[in-house]
Image (tube, grey):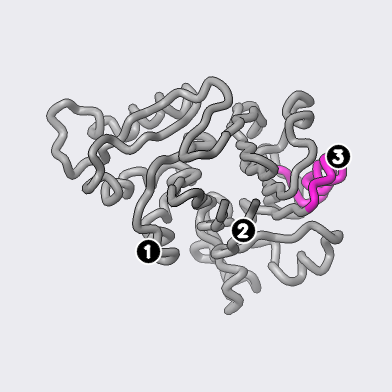
Amino acid sequence: MKVTFLGTGTSIGVPRIGCHCPVCTSDDRKNKRLRCALHLEHQDHSLLVDTGPDLRTQALRYNIDRVDGVLFTHGHADHLHGLDDVRCYCFDREGPLPCYADQHTIERIERVFDYAFNKNAPSTTPQISLHLIEGPFTFCGLDIEPLIVYHGQAPVLAFRIGDFAYVTDTNRIPVETIDRLQGLDVLVLDALRYKEHPTHFNVEQALEIVAALKPAQTYFTHMAHDLDHHKTNAELPDGVELAYDGLVLELR
């Protein structure tokens, strides 16, 4: 499986509008972070994890010419509101594009993108089908295990695929999910900033999760402008580093 980080930034991205801090004004491309999303490629299949508002830019930047399906972690704007841009992936399909989500996210998609479900909607609207995630399932040749984590009080889906796990937008991982995240080769984990936050792990808290899980390699994501890429990496322990937009992992 090939994993491409399409975006590694927080909900407002980096640089932040109107900010002139050293990270926001940095020329280092690793300090420029679009909203969080992943692209997975496996056996000639193409799968998105989340469709944030930067999807069009990400698809063009990373040459994503085809998508066979979408996984959603949750329905917040920074992970959902680019869904309309999947229209381009629907034009040559024989059927609707399958989108997998929990019940709350499905309800939000149906509300926010209600025009896509109008029986009289033109073919230029997103042609999607919604599939409720109720447990492990197989899609595009991948065995996908959904896991519950908490984003403040809200449940959010993390995904384990083989020995890879994607755990974004969380500040609490229940014991049963901790148990399912053991033995990972690669963990991608939310680490917003150094200061504590009510709905995201900060760096210290994320490192505590890493110490508990002991994955072979960890990449932090969903980062704010508080974290300079190289300065922060220099302070992290071996086996832990910040992800960056465009990072590609080749996983077995």
> What amino acid type should be assigned to the residue bearing mark 3?
Ala
Q: Which residue is mark 2?
A: 250
Q: Earlier in the sequence, mark 3 or mark 1?
A: 1
Query: Does the magenta run of residues contain 212?
Result: yes
The image quadrant that residue 199 belongs to is top right
Whether the residues at callouts 2 and 3 have beta carbons within 8 Å, the answer is: no
Q: Which residue is mark 1?
A: 60
Residue 100 placed where, x, y %? 45, 32
> What amino acid type should be assigned to the residue bearing mark 2?
Glu
In whole angstroms, how far apart are the C-alphas of marks 2 and 3? 25 Å
236 or 195, which is in the foreground? Answer: 236
The image quadrant that residue 69 belongs to is top left
Residue 36 placed where, x, y %? 54, 51
Q: Nearer the viewer, mark 2 or mark 3?
A: 2
Which mark is drawn over residue 212? 3
Give me the residue at 70% from left, 43% from top.
163
Q: Residue lying farthest bottom?
A: 27
Magenta region, residue range: 201-216
Q: Earlier in the sequence, mark 2 or mark 3?
A: 3
Residue 127 placed where, x, y %? 26, 37
Give me the residue at 64% from left, 37% from top.
160
* Horizontal relation, residue 110 to residue 4: left or right: left
Q: Is residue 133 above or below residue 204?
A: above
Whether the residues at callouts 2 and 1 have beta carbons within 8 Å, the answer is: no
Badge 3: residue crowd in 10 Å (few <14, some 14–19, many ≥20)? few
213 or 109, which is in the foreground? Answer: 213
Q: Secondary structure at mark 3?
A: helix
Name the dominant secondary structure of the magenta segment.
Answer: helix
